[in-house]
Each structure stands twice: as structure tokens, then as C-alpha cells.
Amino acid sequence: MYTKDGVDYFVVDGHIHFWDASEENTANKYGEGFIRCFYDYQRNLSPAEWVWPLEKFRKYSEQDLMHDLFETGYVDVGIFQPTYLGEFYTNGFNTTERNGRLAAKHPGRLIVNGAFDPRDGRAGLAELERLAAEWQLRGVKLYTAEWRGDSKGWKLTDPGAQDYLAKCAELGIRNIHIHKGPTIWPLNRDAFDVADVDHAATAFPELNFIVEHSGLPRLEDFCWIATQEPNVYAGLSVVMPFIHSRPGYFARVLGELLYWLDEDRITFGSDYAIWSPRWLIEKFVDFQIPEELQSEYGTLTTDVKRKILGLNSARLYDIKVPESAQLPPAQVPA
């Protein structure tokens, strides 16, 4: 938990990974390019003292993760978001199984999410059931631009995807996290287009669609969808580090999200290990909308920051929040 000026901030990092992009696990030039693209995000958007050596970035340890998130990073609960990338990495990049083994060693600290790919057909539906039973899944992470043979991606509007979303509803997997943001080489930019979220959110009102990276660079499209779909949320992973490198841009993105969605549908994520949560959280708690933009976007209150940093995700995942970090009853959304 982070405490500043007598205020407790319960932190749920809603977007973390435990990946293996070691040379031994990298299957081809695409896997090599993928992890180097990730690394460019860290190098270009982080304070210099938070940039890792490439060798560590490729494959960090359990000790690194636990230290960076829970010992020094203020995180109370972290949510693993898997990305398999079986075409690029021999044993997968960041799998539910690898995440789950670590989570099992640290009960109460780490939540395991699953994944699905509608191109897997009936076998994939059975695998989703197995994952749900083994890990008590409350969420899945979808990577619609992932390559599979000759296919360079899929859409939430595909008939097969509808079957999988229906299976999630049946299994009680309520939280559907979708990468809808900047592309990573060599994946196709258009396969991350946000437009298909509109259809899925309308078709499955019982599910929560957390759009990771808030649709960037398609922020306007995302906001127009989210304002009419009350079960669509904005995940701030990738958005957060702009608080350092381009604070004015960060203020405008956050201001637009607050205007269109309100503060109850925005969630914090560090995207660890691209970025470490400590500096993101410290800067966010100290951040204020610049005065020249306040006439349009207003100001950031302490309670809004508390919701974004953890209380919104805690509500989605039924995480118990210590009394000291809770909001007054009048400010808790129904």
C-alpha cells in the first residue's frame, strides 16, 4: 500500500507479466523483434534510472518480480495478463501456467488470468474450461493480433469469438481484458483496432470489457464506444508512463477518459516488466491536471486517484480492501 500525506492508496496492478524471452526460448526473428520492441518502450518512456539491461529484461526472476511489485512497488494485489505468442516463443512468452506456478507460491498477492483464441475451435473451449477449473479464473486476456499459421489476427465479432465469450459468461469469467493499443513488431496494427469492442459489449452486458491501453492511438474511437457501453473500462497500462515523458499528453488522455467514462471505469496497470510500478504510482499521486487544461478537464482529486490506483479493480475482482483505504460510503459506486 502507498501512503502519502496521511492517505492510504490500496494498489491493484491490473496488468503484469512474468515472461520468458530468453534467447533459448526465442523461436525466430519475430520473437526477437517482439521483445526488443517491448524494450524500446521501456527505454524511451522511463526515467533513465529505471531502464534495465536488455539481458535482465529478456528474462527476470521471481525475486525481481516480487521485489519490484510488493517490496518496493507499493502493490497490494497484482493481476497476471497472459500473452502466449506460441509462433514466436518455443514454450510461450507469458503463459497462464508460468504465471500460475508463481501465484501458487504467493497466495493472496497474485491473481491468475487465462486466455483464449477462437481459432482453436472446440478444443480451445475445452481448454478454457480446464484453465477455469484449475485457476478459478475471474478474467481472461485477449490478444487479437496474435499470429497463428497464416492468420494474422481475429476479431471479437467473429462467430467463434462469440462462442468463447458465451463460455466465459457460463463459467463466471466476468472480466475480459483486451489488448487494444499500440502495436508491437511484427504484429499488425489494424488487428488491434478497437471497433469490435462495441459489438461484444452490447452482446454480453454481463461481462466487463477492460480495454487495455485505452485504445491508443485510437482514443477518440474508444471513448465514443465506452460512453454508450457501461460495461467497457479503460486500462491505463502503456498510458501511465507518459506521465514522465509527455505529462501534457498524459493529462489530455486521462482528461478525455474521465470526461467520457468517469472515474469508476478506469484501472491502473504498470505493464510490468516494461515499467515498474513504484515510479508510476509516486508520480500519479503527485500529478495534477495542468492549470491551463483545468477549465476543460477539471482537477484530479485524491479520491479519484484512489479509485484508479486500486479500488476500481478491487471491485471488478472482489478483492477485499483494508478499511483505511476505503472511500466513504457515499462515494462508493453501486
Image: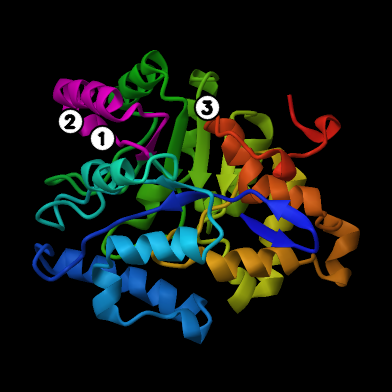
Q: Nearer the viewer, residue 112 or 72?
A: 72
Residue at 17% x, 20% y is 122
Circle 2: element type: helix
Residue at 30% x, 25% y is 132
| Residue 120: mark in rendering | 2
Q: Position of residue 301 (x, y in %)?
A: 82, 54
Quarter that holds the C terminus: top right
Magenta span main SS: helix
Task: Give the extent of the magenta segment.
Answer: 112-141
Q: Tags 3 and 1 in contact by the CB under 8 Å rule?
A: no
Q: Callout 1, which amino acid?
A: Asp
Left/right placement of residue 90 relative to residue 205 reads left
Q: Callout 2, which amino acid?
A: Asp
Residue at 53% x, 81% y is 47
Outermost residue to the top: 170
Circle 3: element type: helix
* Residue 129 on the magenta segment: yes
| Comes first in the chain, label 3 or label 2 | 2
Number of numbered labels in the structure image: 3
Name the colour scheme.
Answer: rainbow
Q: Position of residue 28 (x, y in %)?
A: 10, 65
Q: Callout 3, which amino acid?
A: Ala
Q: How many residues crowd around disc 3 within 10 Å: few (fewer than 14), some, or many (20 or more)? A: many
User: What residue did someone put label 1 on?
Assistant: 117
Q: How many residues crowd around disc 2 within 10 Å: few (fewer than 14), some, or many (20 or more)? A: few
| Residue 62: mark in rendering | none
| Residue 201: mark in rendering | 3
Q: How many residues crowd around disc 1 within 10 Å: few (fewer than 14), some, or many (20 or more)? A: many
Q: Is residue 282 above or below residue 181?
A: below
Q: Position of residue 5 (x, y in %)?
A: 80, 64
Q: Tags 1 and 2 in contact by the CB under 8 Å rule?
A: yes
